[in-house]
Image (tube, rainbow, N blue to C red):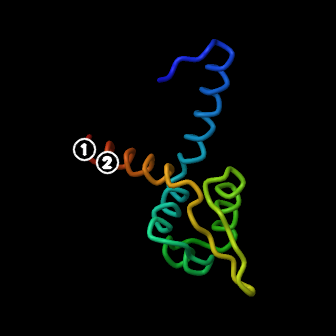
Amino acid sequence: MPTHDAGDLETVLKDAAEFFGLLSAPMRLHIISALCHGEKNVGQLIEAVKTTQPNMSQHLNQLYRKGILSKRRKGVQIYYAIADPQVVQICQTMCDRVTHQR
């Protein structure tokens, strides 16, 4: 880990814990996985991860508010995409680690 003074380190660690907490929900990881190859609209995401519209909306809003996803409107459809490619790399690294521990 990079070196920080004590106050900065506490802030960084708190923010990192919040970030990993956001990614701790399997549904959110599934959404990120579904978006790895490009944007999808809400209906496509619901079909890809097999969940309800209210559940999907809740998870999408949390990921969007934290800057992990971006969104755009086209007519009545809302399309989501990964806003930060580093998130994909982090998720892939975590999944690889878990797979190798089995």
Q: Secondary structure at mark 1?
A: helix
The disc at residue 86 is none
Mark 1 crowdedness (10 Å alpha carbons): few <14, some 14-19, many ≥20: few
Quadrant (top left/top right/bottom left/bottom right) for the C terminus? top left
The amino acid pointed to by label 1 is His
The disc at residue 96 is 2
Mark 2 crowdedness (10 Å alpha carbons): few <14, some 14-19, many ≥20: few
In screen coordinates, is 43 left or right of 36? right
In the image, is residue 30 above or below residue 95? below
Foreground pick, 71 / 51: 71
Foreground pick, 52 / 4: 4
Q: Position of residue 55 (x, y in %)?
A: 65, 66
Q: Position of residue 99 (x, y in %)?
A: 28, 48
The disc at residue 100 is 1
Find out whether the residues at labels 1 and 2 contact each other: C-beta distance under 8 Å: yes
In screen coordinates, is 46 left or right of 65? left
- Give the residue drawn at x 70%, y 83%: 74
